[in-house]
Image: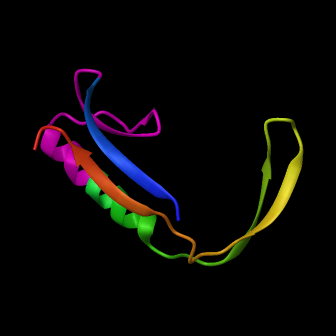
Amino acid sequence: MAHVTYKIVQHDGGWAYTVDGTFSETFPTHKAALTKAKAAAVEQRAPGRTEVIEYEDENGKWHTENAPGSDRPETDVSDSKG
């Protein structure tokens, strides 16, 4: 099973969370970034509907897959400040 960690970091004059090098929007306070990261982590674990998805890979080839709505990652929030 996949695992996703939301990390709280200082960013662009405020605070943000990051996942695999991608930053959220910047929040004015650490508490605000932590609250949003926790909410995103919970939402990421929520099951959805099974759907057919299409995507293009790095070589320009299109793929069609069945994405099960129950296939959700484990998540956590890493906060070095608190």
Q: As rendered, which of 27 and 48 lies closer to the eye?
A: 48
- Residue at point 24% right, 36% down? 27
Which image quadrant is residue 80 in?
top left
- Check if residue 24 falls in the magenta segment: yes
Which residue, as the protein is rendered here, is positioned at the far front? 1
Residue drawn at x 27%, y 57% as measured from the top left: 38
Colour option used: rainbow
State the image quarter where residue 59 is shown.
Answer: top right
Location of residue 44 with respect to 56 vertically, above or below: below
Q: Is-magenta flag for residue 17?
A: yes
Residue 55 picture location, percent across and down: 78, 51
Q: Residue furthest left?
A: 82
Range of the magenta residues? 12-36
- Say whether residue 50 is left or right of residue 41: right
Residue 5, given in percent of the width and then of the height, sits at: 37, 50
The answer to whether residue 43 is above or below residue 63 is below
Q: Residue furthest right?
A: 61
The answer to whether 62 is drawn above or below residue 48 in the figure is above
Residue 28 vs residue 68, the one in the foreground: 68
Query: 12 left or right of 44?
Result: left
The mark total stands at 0
Report the residue at 79% width, 65% height from top: 65
Q: Relative to residue 49, is residue 22 drawn left or right?
A: left
Residue at image position (32%, 57%) is 76
Question: In the rendered view, does 49 fall on the left or right side of 8?
Answer: right
Residue 3: x and y in percent read 45, 57
How far across and down, in percent of the image, does residue 53 sit?
75, 63
The quadrant in which the C terminus is found is: top left
